[in-house]
Amino acid sequence: MTPLERVRIEKAATDYGFDLTPHDDGGWIVLRSSAFPELVRVTTETNKGFVIEAKPPLIFNGSVEATDIHALHACLAKAAATARNIPNRIAQQFIQQTHTLQQTTEIERGVVQRIGQGLFRTSLLDYWGGVCCVTGLALPELLRASRIRPWARCDTNEERLDVFNGLLLSPNVDALFDGGWITFSDAGRVVISEALPNEEWKRLGLDASVCVHGICPEHRSYLTFHRGEVFRVL
């Protein structure tokens, strides 16, 4: 690894929240953050690319290859966002912020739920990089934190606040998904309800090729629930 490659790796790491001093580990640079305990290791390949690993492997399944510095930036951004939003981590924040609040009335329960919704929205904006995961709309003010398995149908706070129980969507896609007019396969491909007339679908400016970009295996159990319990079937 050349000095220039090391500087570029450390600069990229700092940009995405790995704020603690990195250290060497047998040809790898170990990146650390004060915001989460997971470590990320980066090394170079002979073809000028990079290899990234997470310790423990909660962020990546095995190692990930980045062909250039731009791909390295994307990998580190996703790694940091995933680590910050590991499900139990958000649930712990929710418990800390609500443990002294009463929930004996509808108003009090509403306050607690709004706190949870705020944490959930923040985590989805972070995880998806402030971009609709279907259309690519990049105006955070317009984006909706769409829960795949609804709040009231979740069994635990961990489910309610699981970043993988959510999709960051533009308003039209959110309305369709929340209302069960569309759903998504485990691969992220859109499934359109037969209850939605084809001409109305076209008026929404969408087509049958839309999909979720960046779907993960952790989304699948929630999508299975949505297809079985929320999606409209004639």
Image (tube, helix red, strand yellow):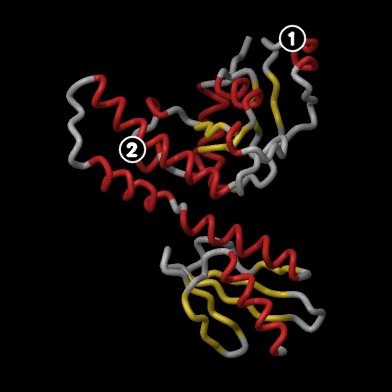
Q: Quadrant of residue 64?
A: bottom right
Residue at the spot 58% in from the left edge and 62% down from the top edge: 60
Callout 2: helix, strand or loop? loop
**Residue holding disc 2:** 156
Mark 2 crowdedness (10 Å alpha carbons): few <14, some 14-19, many ≥20: few
Residue at the spot 57% in from the left edge and 26% down from the top edge: 227
Residue sitting nearer the eye, 9 or 151: 9
Q: Position of residue 110 (x, y in %)?
A: 31, 25
Q: Position of residue 115 (x, y in %)?
A: 35, 36
* Res 39 visible: yes
Please identify the quadrant where the N terminus is shown: bottom right
Residue at the spot 33% in from the left edge and 49% down from the top edge: 93
Measure how far apart labels 1 and 2 are at the Cα level. 36 Å
Q: Position of residue 140 (x, y in %)?
A: 60, 39
Please identify the quadrant where the C terminus is shown: top right
Mark 1 crowdedness (10 Å alpha carbons): few <14, some 14-19, many ≥20: few
Q: Amino acid at mark 2?
A: Thr
Q: Position of residue 197 (x, y in %)?
A: 74, 9
Q: Amino acid at mark 1?
A: Pro
Image height of 155 relative to 19, above or below: above
Q: Quadrant of residue 75?
A: bottom right
- Mark with earlier residue (1, 2): 2
User: Seen in the image, is 190 located left or right of residue 54?
Assistant: right
**Residue holding disc 1:** 197
Image height of 58 relative to 107, above or below: below
Q: Quadrant of residue 25?
A: bottom right
